[in-house]
Amino acid sequence: MIRITIEEASKKYNIPIKILKEYESWGLFQEVKKVMGSWQYDETDLERLSLIMTLHDLDFTVGEIEKYMKLSLEKNEGECLNLLNKKRKGILDEVHLKEKQLSRIDYLRYEMDRGNKK
């Protein structure tokens, strides 16, 4: 069984110890045990940490991550799916906005190029 300290987890996943301690305060790491004066993470804790980092990379706020993780631990897949769908819709809205902006830029470039050929 793999066990790493909070310092090792911080270094391996590039997460400040302060953030890891905040995650621990949420009660998300039920299996984390204090061993010889330091926290030890097992495989389950590392899987949860990986999920937290994925949510972070998807621009979930700290509050959204906390809510998602608690729902996940409660096996409330329906509410987790709702949170994912909401985030997905927000990202799609951003993508569509960026596509419109690109179209406008392309139009301006086209008009500029057309004007230079006259």
Image: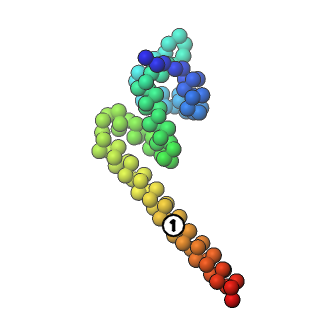
The residue to which callout 1 is attached is 99
Q: Vertically, is 29 above or below 33?
A: below
Can you name the residue that lies furthest to the bottom here?
Answer: 118
Quadrant location, the C terminus: bottom right
**Can residue 106 be seen in the rendering of this structure?**
yes
Residue 115, placed above or below residue 41:
below
Q: Quadrant of residue 106?
A: bottom right
Position of residue 37 measured from the top left corner of the image (x, y, whole percent)? 54, 13
Residue 1 location, quadrant: top left
Number of dots carrying numbers = 1
Residue 64 or residue 53, whichever sits in front: 53
Residue at 40%, 36% in the rendered image: 69
Q: Is residue 61 visible?
A: no
The residue located at (61%, 78%) in the rendering is: 110
Q: Residue at x 47, y 34 (%)?
A: 50
Q: Residue furthest front?
A: 117
Q: Position of residue 12 (x, y in %)?
A: 57, 29
Q: Around disc 1, counting alpha carbons within 10 Å, would you say few (fewer than 14), some (14 to 19), or many (20 or more)?
A: few
Residue farthest top in this picture: 36
User: By what rule are the colours in the image chosen?
Assistant: rainbow
Q: Nearer the viewer, residue 87 or 115?
A: 115
Type of the residue with mark 1: Glu
The location of residue 112, given as percent across then percent down, is 66, 80
Tell me the SS state at disc 1. Answer: helix
User: Is residue 7 rendered to the left or right of residue 77?
Assistant: right
The picture places residue 24, in percent across and down from the top left corner, at 48, 28
Q: Quadrant of residue 47?
A: top left
